[in-house]
Amino acid sequence: MEKPIRRFQNFRWENTDLLAYKEEGSAPFKAITRQTLFCDPALHAELRYFDVSPGGYSTLERHEHMHAVLILRGTGTCLVGDQVYNIAANDLVTIPAWTWHQFRAEPVSHLGFLCMVNVDRDRPALPTVDELKALQSIPTVAAFLKGG
Ligand code: MN
């Protein structure tokens, strides 16, 4: 049986693999790692920790399943729908179904966050050229996507 306690040190947890964010080349992302903290069939949920290095970002995507996010460290920005928000440690972020979202670390700060998802979930969809154009037509979103 797995030990009931896995100690934390420097944003790594004992006996927990440091994984690639997702398969390289499958979608745009930069400087982000994943640790799956809890993944037990009895929970029907997974809790993951993502660490975004300074200047890094998660994939701009949307999907049917929702995300429940707790920012654990650092500062950054996130896109939820067509709104951009500043985020910092201990903020909670809800990503509803079929809502565009992306997390970006600041140029000088890591951004670390917990993300809870259903075990049974659909694959993320990336924006089409037209969908990306529509997002970029909103000035605050365009600046966010450029990393501004
Ligand atoms: Mn997502």
Image (spheres, rainbow, N blue to C red):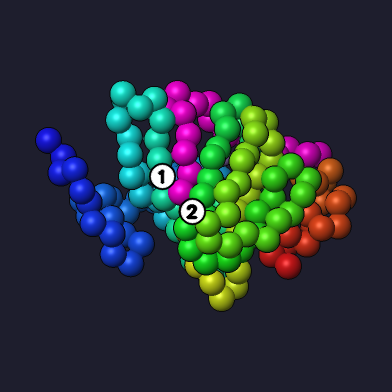
Comparing 30 with 65, the one in front is 65
Residue 122, image x, y percentages: 53, 26
Q: Which quarter of the image is occupied by the C terminus?
A: bottom right
Mark 1 element type? strand
- Taking the spot 60% from the left edge, 69% from the top edge, the residue there is 106
Q: Is residue 43 left or right of residue 99?
A: left
Disc 2 crowd rating (10 Å Cα; few below 14, some 14-19, many 20+) is: many
Magenta segment: 114-131
Measured in 3D between alpha carbons, the distance from the residue under mark 2 to the one under mark 1, in whole angstroms, is 8 Å
Query: Would residue 139 be visible to someone looking at this image?
Result: yes
Mark 2 element type? strand
Among the 4 quarters of the image, the one containing residue 45: top left
Residue 85, image x, y percentages: 71, 56
Q: Is residue 26 magenta?
A: no
Three-letter residue code for mark 2: Phe
- Taking the spot 53% from the left edge, 45% from the top edge, the residue there is 69
Q: Residue furthest bottom?
A: 108
Label 2 residue near ligand 1, CB within 8 Å: no
Residue 113, image x, y percentages: 49, 53
| Pointer 1 residue | 48
Query: Would residue 24 be visible to someone looking at this image?
Result: no
Comparing 8 with 137, the one in front is 8
- Taking the spot 65% from the left edge, 54% from the top edge, the residue there is 78
Q: Is residue 122 magenta?
A: yes
| Pointer 2 residue | 113
